[in-house]
């Protein structure tokens, strides 16, 4: 971290921290929209095979397991389509506009969900596909945004705090969704979609008012914080030009990029499986009722949220103190965020219905430990190519969305009777995918800016201003100055 500058740029009152909080709320909203159906569907569906006392009340739809899997997975069909264009458009036109244009229709579609579900299940599938298209821009656009706002030695904390909102949203939607499904208006479960949709609309308004694409466009930022961010990123008027050419061939032939893609795909399989199927597992195997289901389904994502925050601070500390290189740090946290969840999933698979507490602990740890990879491969895009972070995230998240389509359908096909043995098979598969991803990323991951992503010296026309800034007593000293030259290449 640029230590001297931090004394003049307080963390808690800074604009970059304020931006992280707004992003936190945005991702909470985004995941609320994504997961609300997973908790509501427990009350929506009536299955004649289920004659247990733990069913709170019969649902109004007779959908079989395969159809439920299609409905739950349909979001990811749309989410797959525009990942790369979302990142690219954010780099060209600004993340603020792209996210606003994506998230506004998402809020409207959430409110319309009950109408579509009661009309036809395939109309609901179409709506979820369109909702996925709207949400697709959030992650790659956020990466593009943070490429302009996050100093390298604060990257894990700022981006981690932003993304932690998603897991906080998960944690909230389970108990709130469970409560509304049981006690809410319009039959219970529809109120889940009405409430989340209205809150998302309010967030879009705040986003449009308070967010800016770069420190240079922000009216509320202090001159000191602006200079600190720009110096740490080596920003000048040319670096943020939106007509920069994207080196597509070099991106797709880069070992560092493929390390992120494979790590991202494998990490997402287990997350998406639990994200969409956890309420069903807790109902079918552990025999929780809808109210307890929502409450206990909340705990894993609270743990997930907490681990993201903790790992971000630890990772930045390790990099700042030079205990490990950026590459080694990312590999350590990627391994912790994939191997540990795989181990706990295997343990979960042996739980019986009379071991509810033990099962909740295992699931909580399996989900929570995933938070470590948010300081691993998940933010590695900004390390290896900050200029193209949005595009890179779009590429890796496109591939990593495929598990979101496959996981619900695979689980639905394998758990037709909802037995422990059937669920055990699904957990074994997820653990194997986790382990493969950990090994691949450990062997191929990188942490330095790649040659094809460096800033040519011919574009670096304003180095004197940055040099003046770093030489003043109130800014940078000693080894901290080297962060100014990350990503600069002589020609």
Image (cartoon, rainbow, N blue to C red):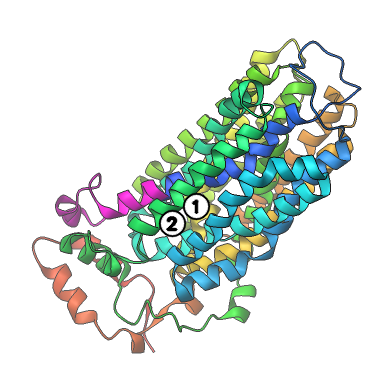
Q: Secondary structure at mark 2?
A: helix
Please give the name of the residue rendered at 72% of the width and 52% of the height, measured from the top-left corner.
127
**Residue 294 visible from this viewpoint:** yes
Q: Position of residue 331 (x, y in %)?
A: 53, 51
Please give the name of the residue rendered at 59% of the width and 51% of the height, measured from the top-left corner.
108
For this rendering, which residue is in front, 323 or 280?
280
- Report if the CB atoms under discs 1 and 2 are less than 8 Å apart: yes
* Left or right relative to 288: residue 453: left
The quadrant in which residue 261 appears is bottom right
Please give the name of the residue rendered at 90% of the width and 27% of the height, measured from the top-left corner.
417
Crowd tier of the residue under label 2, counting other residues whose Cα lies within 10 Å: few below 14, some 14–19, many 20 or above:
many
Crowd tier of the residue under label 1, counting other residues whose Cα lies within 10 Å: few below 14, some 14–19, many 20 or above:
many
For this rendering, which residue is in front, 43 or 406?
43
Range of residues picked out in magenta: 1-22
From the image, give the main secondary structure of the stretch colored magenta. helix
Residue at label 1?
330
For this rendering, which residue is in front, 110 or 41?
110
Residue at label 2?
326
Q: Secondary structure at mark 1?
A: helix
């Amino acid at each position: 971290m640029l230590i001297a500058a931090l004394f003049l740029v307080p963390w808690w009152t800074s604009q970059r921290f304020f931006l992280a909080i707004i992003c936190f709320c945005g991702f909470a909203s985004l995941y609320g929209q994504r997961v609300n159906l997973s908790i509501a569907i427990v009350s929506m569906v009536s299955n004649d095979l289920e004659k247990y006392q733990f069913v709170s009340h019969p649902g109004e739809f007779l959908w079989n397991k395969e159809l439920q899997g299609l409905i739950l997975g349909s979001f990811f069909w749309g989410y797959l389509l525009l990942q790369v264009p979302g990142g690219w458009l954010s780099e060209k036109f600004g993340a603020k506009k792209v996210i606003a244009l994506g998230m506004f229709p998402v809020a409207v579609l959430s409110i319309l969900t009950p109408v579509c579900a009661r009309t036809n299940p395939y109309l609901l599938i179409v709506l979820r596909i369109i909702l996925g298209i709207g949400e697709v821009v959030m992650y790659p656009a956020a990466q593009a945004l943070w490429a302009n706002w996050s100093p390298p030695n604060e990257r894990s904390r700022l981006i981690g705090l932003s993304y932690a909102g998603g897991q906080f949203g998960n944690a909230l939607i389970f108990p709130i969704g469970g409560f509304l499904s049981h006690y809410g208006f319009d039959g219970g479960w529809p109120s889940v979609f009405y409430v989340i949709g209205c809150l998302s609309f309010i967030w879009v308004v705040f986003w449009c008012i308070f967010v800016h694409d770069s420190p240079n466009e922000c009216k509320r930022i202090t001159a000191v914080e602006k200079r600190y961010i720009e110096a740490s990123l080596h920003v000048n008027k040319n670096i943020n030009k939106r007509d920069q050419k994207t080196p597509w061939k070099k991106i797709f032939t880069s070992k560092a990029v493929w390390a992120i893609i494979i790590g991202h795909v494998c990490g997402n399989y287990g997350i998406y499986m639990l994200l969409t199927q956890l309420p069903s597992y807790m109902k079918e195997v552990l025999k929780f009722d809808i109210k307890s289901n929502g409450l206990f389904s909340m705990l894993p994502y609270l743990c997930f949220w907490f681990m993201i925050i903790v790992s971000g601070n630890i990772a930045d500390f390790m990099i700042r103190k030079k205990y490990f290189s950026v590459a080694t740090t990312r590999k350590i946290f990627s391994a912790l965020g994939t191997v540990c969840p795989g181990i706990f999933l295997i343990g979960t698979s042996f739980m019986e219905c009379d071991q509810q507490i033990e099962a909740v602990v295992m699931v909580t740890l399996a989900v929570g430990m995933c938070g470590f990879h948010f300081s691993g491969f998940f933010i590695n895009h900004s390390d290896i190519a900050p200029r193209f972070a949005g595009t890179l995230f779009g590429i890796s998240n496109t591939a990593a969305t495929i598990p979101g389509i496959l996981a619900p359908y695979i689980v639905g096909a394998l758990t037709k009777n909802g037995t422990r043995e059937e669920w055990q098979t699904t957990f074994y598969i997820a653990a194997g995918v986790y382990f493969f991803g950990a090994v691949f990323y450990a062997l191929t991951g990188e942490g330095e800016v790649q040659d094809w992503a460096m800033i040519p010296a011919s574009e670096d026309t304003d180095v004197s201003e940055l040099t003046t800034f770093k030489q003043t007593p109130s800014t940078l000293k000693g080894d901290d100055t080297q962060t100014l030259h990350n990503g600069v290449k002589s020609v």
